[in-house]
């Protein structure tokens, strides 16, 4: 398979780059009969959209988004890997005094929600919990705003790139998966509770398992 692995930061795919001997100068490698390219977009929806669109000028059999996320759901453990199958741009809408109204609810024909309808054949991937997410410009760290956004959308997790990644892949009609690991709970900012390194290691390890399974 010809694969593209996408991350917002180099840190989020550092274990993969090291294991597959991909350097800054050479970001395309062969592994287990796969030709694998890497793309580091930078943080946020705009950078993800721009650089992913450029990368997809080349043809790929599948694209994998690798990263970390914050969890709204207490049933998800820190470090747990999830497969995000539905994501949305949760900030696209209007304010009506203290009420936030998504564009869809006021009849505006704007895509704010993306569902992954593609299918990658992998028994390993099938076992990864499937969850819903929101994509934000500002990660939540205020109790009132956390409660408000959760009551509105009931997401499992949030990231700063996911919906943009999914939207581009859907528009380009390329199979994809958004694979993330939980680095923190969505709560008042407390770095002492974060498990970023654990999340990155677990997510990268899961990608290797999937790459091995693709060849099976």
Image (cartoon, rainbow, N blue to C red):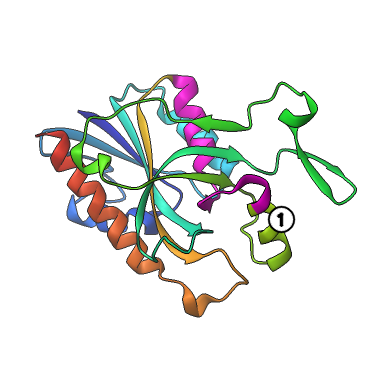
Q: Dot 1 lies on which element?
A: helix
Specify whether 145 is left or right of 183.
right
Residue lying at 21% horizontally and 35% vertically, measured from the top left: 122
Decide which of 80, 73 is in the foreground and name it. 73
Q: Which of the two residues, 201 or 46, is positioned nearer the viewer here?
A: 201
The image shows residue 173 at horizontal and vertical percentages of: 42, 19
Q: Main secondary structure of the magenta part?
A: helix
Residue 129 visible? The answer is yes
Q: Which residue is mark 1?
A: 148
* Residue, far bottom: 192
Which image quarter holds the N terminus? Answer: top left
Q: Residue furthest right?
A: 97
Q: Residue at x 60, y 72 (%)?
A: 189
Residue at 27% from the left image edge and 32% from the top image edge: 3
Question: Quick check: is 173 in the magenta stretch?
Answer: no
* Residue 169 located within the stretch drawn in magenta: yes
Image coords of residue 19 (percent x, y)? 18, 55
Residue 210 location, x and y as percent? 21, 42
Q: Would you say 169 lies left or right of 29 here?
A: right
Which quarter of the figure is the C terminus placed in?
top left
Q: Nearer the viewer, residue 65 or 157?
A: 157
- Residue 128 location in percent, x, y? 30, 47
- Read off the magenta span: 151-172
Residue at (18% x, 51% y) in the render: 21
- How many discs appear? 1
Q: Residues within 10 Å of mark 1 (few under 14, many from 20)?
A: some
Residue 17 visible in image: no
Q: Is residue 215 toward the left or the right of residue 35 in the image?
A: left
């Amino acid at each position: 398979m010809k694969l593209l692995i996408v991350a917002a930061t180099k840190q989020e795919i550092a274990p993969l780059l090291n294991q597959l001997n991909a350097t800054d100068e050479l970001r395309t490698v062969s592994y287990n009969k796969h030709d694998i390219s890497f793309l580091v977009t930078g943080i946020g929806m705009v950078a993800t959209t721009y650089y992913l669109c450029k990368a997809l000028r080349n043809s790929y059999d599948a694209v994998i988004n690798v990263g970390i996320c914050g969890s709204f759901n207490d049933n998800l453990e820190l470090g747990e890997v999830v497969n995000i199958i539905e994501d949305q741009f949760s900030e696209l809408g209007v304010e009506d005094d203290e009420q936030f109204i998504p564009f869809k609810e006021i009849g505006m024909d704007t895509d704010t929600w993306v569902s992954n309808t593609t299918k990658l054949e992998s028994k390993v991937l099938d076992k990864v919990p499937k969850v819903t997410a929101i994509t934000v410009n500002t990660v939540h760290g205020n109790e009132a705003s956390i409660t408000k956004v959760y009551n509105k959308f009931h997401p499992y997790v949030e990231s700063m790139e996911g919906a943009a990644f999914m939207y581009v892949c859907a528009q380009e009609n390329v199979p994809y998966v958004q694979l993330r690991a939980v680095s923190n709970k969505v709560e008042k900012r407390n770095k002492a509770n974060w498990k970023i390194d654990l999340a990155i290691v677990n997510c990268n390890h899961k990608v290797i398992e999937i790459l091995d399974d693709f060849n099976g």
